[in-house]
Image (cartoon, rainbow, N blue to C red):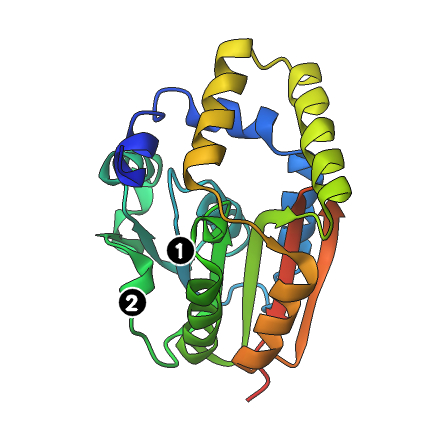
Amino acid sequence: MAIDQAFNATIDYYDDWIRKAVPGYDEMFAIARELLSFPEGTEVDVLDLGAGTGLFSRLVLGKYPHGRFVLVDVAAKMLDVARDRFRDHSGQFSYRVDDYRSFREEGRFDLVISALSIHHLADAEKRTLFARVHGALRTGGIFLNIDQIRGGTPALQELYCDTWLTRVRAAGASEEEIQGGIERRLAYDREATLLDQLRWLGEAGFVDADCVYKNYLMGLFYAVKKS
């Protein structure tokens, strides 16, 4: 099954599932909101890569209600959910059913965001994408990426996976939901290590880049374009 079909099939339960499936979900997104340092009232231009149902864009809109948003995803039905979510702000939102690996933008955006998406790319594709994100940002622009991290050793990867399973069960996920999540991970996930991702951000041109929050296999990456 193609990745767009796989995620289109989750629209009825995705938002509920993702809160169970991501360790530290509330804290991580709260920190992401804190990192949005543009002055209050700024009409920020936002690019959301792998936007899905628009959960990350909703967080940004809550802080910058006059922002302008471009949401990109290969899964058309997930973007339909986002359209409905932002129906009262339709003039501020545009949607692209597209593979964001092909996007070309130069210096247009103040903020590029992504959540739980870039880990689906091969490592070489991640490196290329980080460079394109740097190019798409205006000077002073911010890149926020909430994504999965592969353990640097087999033992660490096993720890991450075992901890995830314990926590998702404790969060109330059913065994059917868990099995579906595992099957999607095995089919589509290509996580990279923390050190590799930070190195690629540096190679892309980001001077200030860090993983500012980490919870086992989940991390919040923050990078600023200085020039």
Number of the label disc, if any, that sits on residue 27: none
Q: Quadrant of the C terminus?
A: bottom right
Above or below: residue 172 compared with residue 123: above
Q: Tell me if residue 194 can be seen.
A: yes
For the residue marked with disc 2, what is the amino acid?
A: Phe
For the residue marked with disc 1, what is the amino acid?
A: Leu
Tag 2 residue: 103
Above or below: residue 131 compared with residue 171: below
Q: Nearer the viewer, residue 102 or 30?
A: 102
The 10 Å Cα crowd at callout 2, few under 14, some 14 to 19, many 20 or more, is few
The 10 Å Cα crowd at callout 1, few under 14, some 14 to 19, many 20 or more, is many
Residue 50 x/y as whole percent: 39, 49
Number of the label disc, if any, that sits on residue 49: 1
First of labels 2, 1 by sequence position: 1
Task: Assign a secondary structure to mark 2.
Answer: loop
Question: Is 147 displayed left or right of 50 in the figure?
Answer: right
Q: Quadrant of the N terminus?
A: top left
Question: Is 36 displayed left or right of 87 in the figure?
Answer: right
Please report the residue visible at 48 percent of the width from the left and 43 percent of the height from the top: 189
Please report the residue visible at 55 percent of the width from the left and 56 percent of the height from the top: 145
Above or below: residue 79 compared with residue 208: above
Residues under numbered marks 2 and 1 in contact, where contact means CB atoms less than 8 Å apart: yes
